[in-house]
Image (cartoon, rainbow, N blue to C red):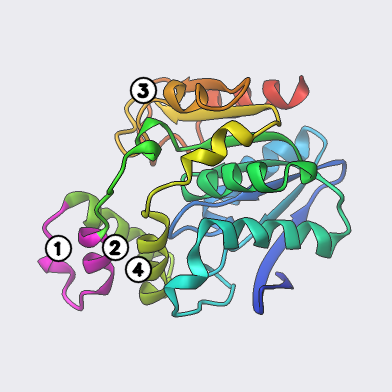
């Protein structure tokens, strides 16, 4: 891993391949390794002639893990990926994020349109627009010393995923609480780059892709057949749709 500085934090990143750059932003409680390498996304993009830029987001993986909720806003994380482009001397890149990374990508595309070309936000959909999302069950699941006490199946899944990836659970709890606050939907009409929203057909966490895409000028949607939130990540149809979109 290599490292760069952003907002006073030391953040880890990796670059693979040669060609036109694409920056990948992983999901909550994940890492660049789990989200993009283990799913063969990085290999697929390198074989397509792309320079693949991947980072561990703040609070995750090999990056710094501050214990202050104010450090985990979507705007701050969008700033991190711009800082990574600056560090690498890249004036711009295509951009793809999954789940939380998809949220970060949409905010980055709205706030820094000059730095991105094609934008893919996957693992997000209509539920991103829900108001007053409750984060208590997942936060409690991350912080408890007794995993057997977790009642919510969804919260138990987040805890298991965090433990499997050897994550700092306090940092993740703060991050989850911050990103579950109301998404800044007012930014969506400001996105001027070609944007593809991707969600699994049975992804109850994301909801359908089309209603979210409709909020973005010229936004398009792709539904991954028969996939839920976890199984959609490395799906072949998802990869084929993204490669087609990037080639346009």
- The magenta region covers 136-152
Image location (x, y in percent) of residue 117: 76, 35
Q: CA distance from mark 4 to mark 1?
A: 15 Å
Report helix, strand or loop for mark 2. Answer: helix
Real-space Cα separation, disc 3 to disc 2, in angstroms: 25 Å
Could you tell which of marks 2 and 4 lies nearer the N-terminus? Answer: 2
Identify the residue position indicated by label 3 in the image: 226
Q: Camera-side residue: 77 or 242?
A: 77
Report the Cα–Cα distance between label 2 and label 4.
10 Å
Distance from disc 4 to disc 3, alpha carbons, whole Å, reads 30 Å
- Give SS at disc 4: helix
Percent from the top left, x then y, of residue 231?
Answer: 40, 37
For mark 1, give the secondary structure: loop
Of labels 3 and 2, earlier in sequence is 2
Mark 1 in CB contact with mark 2 (< 8 angstroms): yes
Check if mark 3's residue and mark 1's residue have beta carbons within 8 Å: no
Vertically, is 236 above or below 163? above
Closer to the eye: label 4 or 1: 4
């Amino acid at each position: 891993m290599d490292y760069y500085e952003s907002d006073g934090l030391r953040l880890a990143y990796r670059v693979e391949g040669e060609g036109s750059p694409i920056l990948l932003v992983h999901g909550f409680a994940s890492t660049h390794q789990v989200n993009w390498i283990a799913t063969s996304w990085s290999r697929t993009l390198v074989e397509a002639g792309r320079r693949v830029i991947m980072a561990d987001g703040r609070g995750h993986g090999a990056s710094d893990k501050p214990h202050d909720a104010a450090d985990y806003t979507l705007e701050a994380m969008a700033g991190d990926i711009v800082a990574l482009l600056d560090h690498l001397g890249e004036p711009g890149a295509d951009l793809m994020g999954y789940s939380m990374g998809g949220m970060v990508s949409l905010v980055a595309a709205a706030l820094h349109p000059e730095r991105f070309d094609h934008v893919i936000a996957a693992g997000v959909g209509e539920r991103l627009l829900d108001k007053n999302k409750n984060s208590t069950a997942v936060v409690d699941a991350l912080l408890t010393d007794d995993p057997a006490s977790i009642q919510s199946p969804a919260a138990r899944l987040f805890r298991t995923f965090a433990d499997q990836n050897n994550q700092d659970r306090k940092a993740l709890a703060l991050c989850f609480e911050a990103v579950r606050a109301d998404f800044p939907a007012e930014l969506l009409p400001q996105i001027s780059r070609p944007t593809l929203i991707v969600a699994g057909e049975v992804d109850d966490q994301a909801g359908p892709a089309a209603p979210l895409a409709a909020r973005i000028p010229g936004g398009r949607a792709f539904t991954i057949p028969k996939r839920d939130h976890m199984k959609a990540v490395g799906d072949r149809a998802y990869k084929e749709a993204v490669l087609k979109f990037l080639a346009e």
